[in-house]
């Protein structure tokens, strides 16, 4: 039986530090199990949207400079979120154009981290990034899997995937497959988070497209969440939302969390779609029991926020420290589940690196 592992990372701005901490823990447990390869060796596809797409790309796209010719570790990505988050949110006094943040510094850093002309074909494992094509009014899945949308520069696809209304203006992305002597067509893109804050369903659909889900094959999907708020929704705050020009985000963060939960039905659906045996799922994380151990194919790692808030752009040091505290607690709450994921990812041995093989053809 051919086994393929999919890693999907939710998007929520600075709260992406939570799944990064889970990735750090997975790397630590892999090393403890004598698995010394980079994380991308143990997965066949990494998916993300918005800032989680930056995480996904960093895990499986080599740095373009000879001195750093390697993919990023989760520890390096964590440092980027904890200490270098200015590369994401540059907020000058005056920003020209739509969007509250200037994309200039962000774009410059994307070029530096991934290279000016690095395309999806350079990824060391499968890479999937959802975005929205504004010209043709359709969802597009950037992917280097067979027959996917791979003729795009990685940094531009990431810029387009991060173009949410709360952050950046839409991005113009070059379609290299339509390149002509007089120039390359530009397509306006906005964030895939408008349709897939949790990109796990997009990843599963893509796996189905390349026939990874046929009988005789096995797909293991590991989905990492960004924390949920389980506090009661304040009625009077909701009642007055929208009055005096206020948005839901400016009235109360829990309302934003509630809206994002409604956008993410994937965990409940994938629990019944992928798992071979019945399992308990509480809306936050998969519940591992002695009865379902070693038999599940879908794993959801998430937890409730107790210290940090739901804002995607709260860069205050105290909020980042609070999110890190939440991350440590979520890891502790999912201790047995993380051990199970490592076991399922490796089955006792490291997987070979992805080599961009073509999808099999069946009569």
Image (cartoon, rainbow, N blue to C red):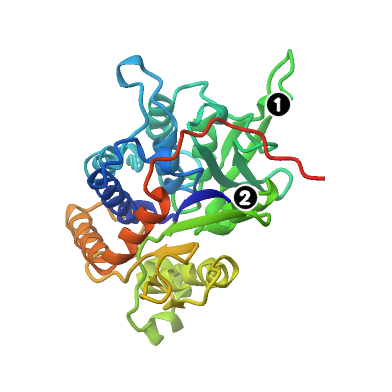
Q: x%, y% of residue 172?
A: 59, 34
User: Could you say whether the residue bearing mark 2 is in a helix, strand or loop?
Assistant: helix
Residue on which the image places disc 1: 177
Q: Is residue 55 left or right of residue 164?
A: left
Q: How many residues crowd around disc 1 within 10 Å: few (fewer than 14), some, or many (20 or more)?
A: few
Tell me if I can see residue 199 in this picture: no
Q: Which mark is residue 100?
A: none
Q: Quadrant of residue 79?
A: top left
Q: Is residue 60 left or right of residue 269?
A: left
Q: Is residue 349 above or below residue 334?
A: above
Compare residues 335 and 241 and report the one nearer the observer. 335
Give the percent coordinates (x, y) of residue 257: 41, 70
Q: Nearer the viewer, mark 2 or mark 1?
A: 2
Q: Quadrant of the C terminus?
A: top right
Please report whichever mark, 2 or 1, sits nearer to the chain's N-terminal start: 1
Camera-nearest residue between 172 and 119: 119
């Amino acid at each position: 039986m051919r086994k393929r592992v999919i890693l999907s990372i939710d998007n929520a701005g600075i709260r992406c530090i939570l799944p990064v901490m889970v990735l750090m823990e997975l790397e630590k447990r892999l090393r403890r199990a004598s698995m010394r390869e980079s994380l991308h060796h143990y997965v066949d596809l990494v998916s993300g949207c918005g800032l989680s797409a930056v995480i996904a790309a960093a895990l499986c796209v080599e740095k373009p400079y000879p001195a750093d010719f390697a993919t990023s570790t989760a520890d390096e990505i964590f440092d980027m979120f904890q200490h270098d988050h200015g590369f994401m949110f540059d907020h000058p006094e005056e920003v020209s154009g739509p969007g509250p943040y200037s994309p200039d510094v962000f774009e410059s850093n994307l070029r530096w981290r991934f290279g000016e002309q690095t395309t999806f074909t350079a990824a060391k494992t499968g890479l999937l990034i959802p975005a929205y094509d504004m010209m043709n009014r359709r969802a597009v899945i950037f992917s280097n899997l067979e027959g996917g949308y791979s003729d795009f520069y990685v940094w531009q696809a990431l810029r387009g995937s991060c173009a949410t209304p709360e952050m950046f203006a839409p991005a113009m992305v070059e379609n290299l497959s339509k390149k002509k002597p007089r120039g390359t067509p530009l397509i306006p893109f906005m964030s895939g988070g408008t349709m897939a804050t949790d990109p796990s369903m997009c990843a599963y659909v893509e796996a189905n497209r390349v026939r990874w889900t046929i009988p005789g094959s096995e797909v293991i999907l590991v989905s990492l969440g960004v924390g949920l708020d389980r506090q009661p929704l304040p009625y009077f705050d909701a009642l007055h939302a929208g009055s005096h020009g206020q948005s839901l985000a400016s009235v109360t963060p829990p309302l934003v969390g509630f809206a994002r939960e409604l956008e993410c039905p994937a965990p409940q659906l994938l629990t019944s779609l992928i798992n071979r045996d019945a399992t308990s799922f509480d809306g936050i994380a998969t519940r591992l029991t002695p009865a379902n151990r070693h038999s599940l194919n879908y794993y959801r790692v998430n937890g409730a926020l107790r210290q940090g808030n739901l804002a995607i752009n709260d860069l205050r040091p105290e909020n980042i420290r609070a999110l890190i505290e939440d991350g440590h607690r979520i890891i502790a709450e999912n201790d047995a589940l993380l051990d199970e994921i490592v076991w399922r990812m490796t089955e006792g041995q490291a997987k070979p690196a992805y080599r961009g093989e073509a999808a099999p053809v069946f009569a």
